[in-house]
Image (cartoon, helix red, strand yellow):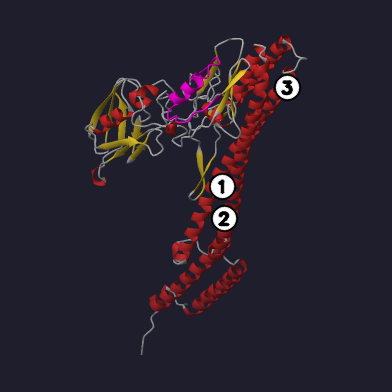
Amino acid sequence: MFRVTNRMLYNNTLVNAFRHNENILKAQEQLSSGKRVNRPSDDPIGIGEIVTHKTRINRNEAYSSIAIKAENLMNSSDGLIGTANELAVRAKELALGQVGNLASAQTRAITAREIDQLIEQAMTIGNTQIGSDYIFGGRRTDTAPIDTNSGLYQGDGSELTAEINQNATVNISVLASDFLTSDMNVQLNSSTSVSLLNGGSGVAAGNFTITDRAGATGTVSVSAGDTIANVIAAINASAANVTASLSADNSGIRIQDNTSVASVTGPMIIAESGSTTASDLGILGSRNVQYLHGSDLNADAASATLLSDLFGGVGFTPGDIIVNNAGTSATVSFAGATTLGDMITSINATGIGATASINSAGNGISLTSASSATVAYAEDIGNGMTASLLGINGGSNLIGTLQKLSAALKANDTGAIGGLINVIDSNIDSIISARGDVGARVNRIVSSQAYLDRSTYDSQLMLNEVESADMAEVAVELSMLQTAYQATIASSASIVQPSLLDFLR
């Protein structure tokens, strides 16, 4: 017969009490937290589903936050573009009032002053800031997009983007060159001179060092007359184990660190050696990455610039335009043109006293009259966009058109005033188009937010199904556990009655 000792009775009583206490604690925890699963051991299989749902919810909330900021930015841009449209409409009204015989040189001079105010307002719109960032200059948020002296664009050609959902990216900025002024956005190629970079400011001659992630350091020298190809070759010939090339969008320099993962000891470091050369090339800094993507180098146009290198490398095939000056006009054909120089030559061959040249910002063409008494301007033929794209009025170049109109009013050039009315119409069309594009992007952002909200709601439902406790069921179970615990204590107390004194008698 098996002998049951007092020690066994005590141990069994403790085990039962502890087990009931543990179950009661677990039930109380579920009631207080509202969760069925509070730790992985509660449901090893369900915890995987819980982590998946929570990850999706957190990701959706992050994307939703980005989408809200993007929508706010786009809405602000939309309102400002609308204001620019009002400026253009007002300019047309003023031009219409000054083109007839009821106007005089005096009234036109007075009207010119209001047009100058409209120009100032347009520049203010273009240089709008949110916080410390300029919103219409693309990725160059630290520089005013519009030069307030010339009215020309000095931002870059790359828009800000935001990932509003997994693998879904949308442009969230508008360039001033889309509705206020022009930019031919010249892309780099291997023959681009460093003197044309950074809006014509060029690159300072000097040295900089490159240290790869394994610690090998090389020195790179750049001269004032170098081309992009020379710079890339110098980087690749240095003692650092790196390979330089043009970036995929041909806007800057890309450097690949060839160090094997096992040999990595630190970041890739590009440092100056007494000059601003690396900074001017957009590659200065220390980065713990294999690929360094330099900033947009904003190359200026030159006579030798290929038409295929314009507009970020998209290029364009020019159509015919009409150039007007001093009451005469000439149709200009660009058939066979391959460079900007070819187009400038064709315009200058009209013989009507209109001269074309690359503008001071290096991102468009300027058209001037040989006489201060007249204003030269250009028009597109039909649905063409050549004059607009070149920056010689029309299309997105509202500020340039207003400057022409102001000059025509001051010169009492009624022919130019009347002709510029049609040009303003093309400005209005471009502004409306830009605003429509903003609206389409806002709709996409809003649709993405709606999808994220629905996905979050569905994920929360599934999470609750796996993680949440049935409060009524847990409350009943807790009551049963407490009853069982009390019964165990009571029954054990009646069985385990002897004390130490019983054994000392």
Magenta region, residue range: 331-358
> In front: mark 1 or mark 3?
3
249 vs 194: above or below:
below
Is residue 180 left or right of 496 when viewed as pictured? Answer: right
482 vs 338: above or below:
below
Residue 433 drawn at (x, y percent): 62, 37
Give the residue displayed 35% in from the left and 37% down from the top. 292
Mark 1 vs mark 3: which is more N-terminal?
A: 1
CA–CA distance between discs 3 and 2?
Answer: 55 Å
The numbered disc on residue 487 is: none
SS for dot 3: helix
**222 and 494: which is toward the camera:** 222
Q: Tell me the amino acid under the disc marked 2.
A: Thr
Badge 1 crowding class, 10 Å Cα cut-off, few under 14, some 14 to 19, many 20 or more, is: many
The numbered disc on residue 96 is: 3
Q: Which quadrant of the figure contains the N terminus? A: bottom left
Which residue is identified by label 2? 456
Give the residue displayed 42% in from the left and 75% down from the top. 10
Residue 137 drawn at (x, y percent): 52, 29
SS for dot 1: helix
Residue 212 drawn at (x, y percent): 27, 36
SS for dot 2: helix
In magenta segment, residue 58: no
Q: Tell me the amino acid under the disc marked 1.
A: Ser
CA–CA distance between discs 1 and 3?
Answer: 48 Å
Which residue is identified by label 1? 64
46 vs 119: above or below:
below
Quadrant in the picture for residue 96: top right
CA–CA distance between discs 1 and 2?
Answer: 10 Å
Asked if marks 1 and 2 touch (Cβ < 8 Å), the reply is yes
Asked if marks 1 and 3 touch (Cβ < 8 Å), the reply is no
Badge 2 crowding class, 10 Å Cα cut-off, few under 14, some 14 to 19, many 20 or more, is: many
